[in-house]
Amino acid sequence: MKRRFSCLLLAGLLGLSLAACAPRGSADPSKSQSAGADDPDTLTIAVTKDENTLAPFTYVSSTGLTVNRLVYDTLFTTDTDNNVIPWMVSDDYQVDADSRVYTFSLLPGQKFHDGTPLTAEDVAFSFLYCAGQNVAQLRKIANQIEAIEILEGDTLRFTLKESNISFLRDGLCTMRIISKAIYENEPDGTLVTESVGSGMYRLAEYKPGQYYRLEAVGDYFRGAPRVRVLQMPIIEDPSAVQQSLLSGELAAATSTVGTEVLEAFRSKPGMTVFASAGYSPVMMNINCGRAPMDQSAFREALACAVDVSGIMHTLYGDYCSVGTRGLVRSDLPYAAEGLDYTYDPGRADTLLDTLGYTEKNAVGVRLDESGAPLSFEILVYANNPLRLRMAELISQQLRQVGLDLRVKAMEMDTVDAYVWPDFEVSKGRDYDFAMWGWGSSISPDYLVNLCAGDYESGGDNVCGYRSDAFDAVVDGALREVRNMDQMEDVLRQLQEIVAEDPPLINLGYPDSLQVCNTALYGGWKSMKGGNVVNVFTFLPEH
């Protein structure tokens, strides 16, 4: 099966129609030329978290993933409209009719930042090496592969153990290509501290807790980047980022801004707000393995007691999409209909009474069977004021049905250690509730990653959710998927299951609102569900 069918299949399954409010380009990377004469030599862009050395096994959040993509290439990528396109490979790649065999050839002229050529051996090694690493997402990709063959020249053939129509997006767009020479003698990838990729920028300097300095690769195979140096200070305080943007100290930031400051930026000469539909969900995680949250009826009571729509519109106005019980953004082509949350405190009270929590203490908090109050903690990043406010609103609403929820603000790394220790869900979790989010929910595999009980499939199952019905579909019908219609049907089945047996509360999807100084640089490209700090922003004009 040739490239045209593969791209149409993914476009049909994942195609999106929401346009950004600000102008953006749709650069064709195959038509790159040299940088423009008026492009700045240096841009200062804030990074909102220290992401270690930015290597594929050391960065810790979606911010690190954003910057990492400038340093490490992937075989395929997604363009500004979120369509899968070849990046390191020629456009005559092939996918067989079962979406099990993928064949492609590397484009010439690629090399690592240390000057060594990038070969098919490095590509094969990148996938095989990750099978033994502790990064669940990368290990999952590697473990889908039955064989990798290096054919004539720099042509590779990947054969998967099972059919997977999402492998272009979820595998080949995700796996960073690393140098075999650097990693082959180190079994633990986290111990490799040097960051040597093949991307358009190389990591020239890193001062922990202070800044990154990226320098353009002048002979990059797609053409020299338009900006020679990206100076990236680490600024964790959102208010400080916004003030630095307004003052002109920053040209952009990897983070978004809140709706309350939009007019201040829009009235500032030279500043442009890039607004696009957001696909990064914000949610209330529930530890499904801890009593009484291990009871489906208790989690159902929580879902009825929280005014999901009211909270989202209070905090984001019209700049959001409200979440659904199916945990999938409602405008995606495979979203099941009729799964909206219903705010019903009366039903929440009834469910809690039915579970036996009828007695209350002097301040109206329900008591468990031992007479202890149903008091819980919800963990929140201390530097995220919107999530803090969201947790406070949820706490107020749960108090109305007799549940005591105390908001506990902590450093990001500390929250992560409780919710997702070492970013490996098989290591368990130690929390009641947590305000949480993910980098993106566009992929069809998102729901499986989030909820599958097998942690190889459910690598993002930080709630410890277990559902026999859900897992039966994953292990059965999902494995038989061969086309778009079948995939959409299976995804809708999974949404119906989590709607009836909630693993968490998906509040919704804030729009992506980023501010860039277009007076300093005019090449910013907004991506659907992505970041203005991306390869197309710096790719040479065509």
Image (spheres, rainbow, N blue to C red):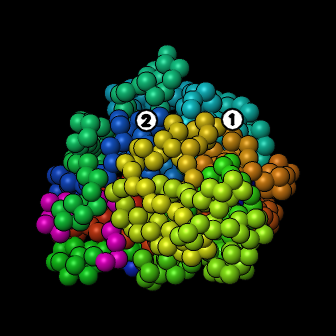
Camera-side residue: 1 or 324? Answer: 324
Nearer to us of marks 1 and 2 is 2
State whether residue 435 is above or below residue 402: above
Highlighted magenta segment, given as a residue range: 245-260
Q: Is residue 191 left or right of residue 39?
A: right
Q: Which mark is residue 58?
A: 2
x 53%, y 70%: residue: 363
x 79%, y 43%: residue: 162
Disc on the earlier residue, 1 or 2:
2
Q: Is residue 81 left or right of residue 27?
A: right
Camera-side residue: 102 or 423? Answer: 423
How far across and how far down the image is residue 477, in percent? 85, 55
How far across and how far down the image is residue 213, in percent? 23, 42
- Name the quadrant containing residue 398: bottom right
Q: CA distance from mark 1 to mark 2?
A: 20 Å
Q: Is residue 55 left or right of residue 162?
A: left
Residue 329 in view, yes or no: no
| Amino acid type, label 2 | Thr
Q: Which residue is mark 1?
A: 143
Q: Is residue 534 one of those drawn in magenta?
A: no
How far across and how far down the image is residue 356, in percent? 76, 65
